[in-house]
Amino acid sequence: MRAKLANLEFLRTKQPHVQMVNTWNAAINDHMVDINEAIGFRAVERWREWQLELSRPTSQLHDFSRVGVVGRRRIGGRMVRSIGRSRRV
């Protein structure tokens, strides 16, 4: 915690115009979550990250016939496609 506090103080001293700092860490890292909360950081967003084990053959990874474009939405001024599973009836 002392290192993080020292860095924040350094930032305040050298860059006084900075008004907000973002930080992130894994939700399972309880120690760092506790430190961030003790300092006064607040959670504003939660992310999910996905991993794929590549040791399996590609043919076993997914049934691609069930994936398709399910919608479009505007992000940052540009149109993007949402990809997801289509429902089989």
Image (cartoon, rainbow, N blue to C red):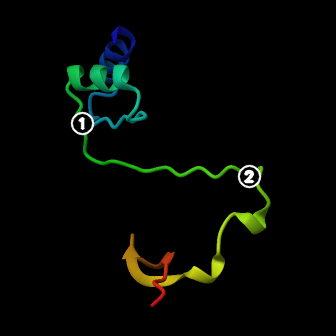
Q: Which element type, helix, strand or loop, lies under badge 2?
A: loop
- Where residue 77 appears, as percent x and y from the top left, is 39, 75
Between 55 and 71, the one lying in front of the other is 55
Q: Quadrant of residue 20?
A: top left
Residue 19, label in figure: 1
The answer to whether residue 24 is above or below residue 45 is above
- Where residue 24 appears, as percent x and y from the top left, is 39, 36
Inter-mark Cα distance, 2 to 1: 42 Å
Residue 20 visible to the viewer:
yes
Residue at image mark 2: 54
Structural crowding at the residue carrying mark 1, measured as other residues with C-alpha within 10 Å and reported as few (<14), some (14–19) or many (≥20): few
- Where residue 3 appears, as percent x and y from the top left, is 39, 11
Q: Amino acid at mark 1?
A: Gln
Structural crowding at the residue carrying mark 2, measured as other residues with C-alpha within 10 Å and reported as few (<14), some (14–19) or many (≥20): few
Q: Quadrant of residue 38?
A: top left
Left or right? Give the position of 67 relative to 54: left
Q: Residue at x 39, y 49 (%)?
A: 47
- Where residue 66 appears, as percent x and y from the top left, is 57, 81
